[in-house]
Structure formats: structure tokens, C-alpha cells
Image: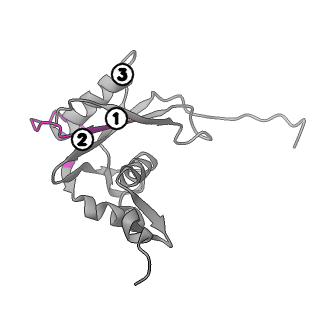
Amino acid sequence: MRGTHYIHEYLILPDVCAVIAEIPEGVILVEQFRPALGRKILELPAGRLRRGEDPVQGARRELQEETGYQAGDMRLLSRFYPSVGLSRHKVHLYYTVNPVPGPTHWDATEEIEVKIIPVSEVPNLLIEGRAADAKTHLGLVYFLNARGWLLQRGRWRPAQEIAKPPQ
């Protein structure tokens, strides 16, 4: 109500960087246990930015630490607030193609499994809720849209399939 005073609590969190990394075999994701959900979840390689760290450098670092892949060119796709009712932190979403494989550097608390998901399987991850956190879901939607995939009647389809006239 107008005129009512209340206390609003929110978290002060560092910004996050996330990377859509594409290789010829598919998209590089990580699977890890998330205590808040009580289960493992597939996610884009991502993590918190360090104090004063440039987001693109943070994205490179997180990709290499979590997956072992080292990125060449990185393209910023979006910056967004994942949960404005809870925090004011931003996610910086990047894309890279053909990163070079190498060793991982996991934090002591991380138990990560690197997964390569064929592009043809990405729509199923979204529909089935297997890539359900906001940064991963949005990143994979960007990824599919960039390839001409569209969501129509609850199904992801290549645009050329939708545009075909009836035979």
C-alpha cells in the first residue's frame, strides 16, 4: 500500500559471467550438484567475477577452470539481471566458438562433469527442463535463435522447417 513503510531485504552479490562455448561436436556444458535444488543440473560454464575483474576475462577464466577449454574470440551476447527481487547482480553472457581443450582447474568445493551436448539435443534440454537455471536457459535460447531455430507450439524447430509450404 502507498505510504506504508517496510524493510526490503536483498543480497549483495558479485556479477557473474557465463559462456556458451561451441565446438564441432556441440555445446560445452557442465553438470554439478546444486544444494538449493538437491540435485545435479546442467549449466553453462559460469562463475562469479573477482573484484575488479573485467567480465570477458572472467568468462575466459571460468571456461578454462571448469571445462579446461581456452577461448579465443569472445562475443558479448547480453547482460541481464537474473533476479531483481533478490539481488542487483548482473550476468554477462558470452559466446565463443572452437575453444582449445586443456586441463581443468576446479575449486576445492567443485565436483564438475564436463558434458558435450550435440546441437540437435539442445532443444530437448530446454523443453524437458534439464537446463533450467536462468543463465543457461537464456543462453541456449540465444544459441538456438542464432541458428534459425524457433519455438512454435511448444516445439523447437529449424526456421526452414516452419517456412516450408504445405505439400
Q: Name the residue under label 2.
A: 110
Separation of disc 2 and disc 3 at Cα?
17 Å
The amino acid sitting under disc 2 is Glu
Separation of disc 1 and disc 3 at Cα?
9 Å
Please report the residue visible at 33 percent of the width from the left and 25 percent of the height from the top. Answer: 56
Q: Name the residue under label 1.
A: 47
Q: What element carries label 3?
A: loop
Asked if residue 1 lies left or right of residue 72, the reply is right
Please report the residue visible at 44 percent of the width from the left and 76 percent of the height from the top. Answer: 165
The amino acid sitting under disc 1 is Gly
Crowding at dot 2, Cα within 10 Å, few <14 / some 14-19 / many 20+, comes out as: few
The magenta segment is 93-113
Residue 83, magenta (yes or no): no
Q: Name the residue under label 3.
A: 50
Q: Is mark 1 on a helix, strand or loop?
A: strand
Q: What element carries label 2?
A: loop
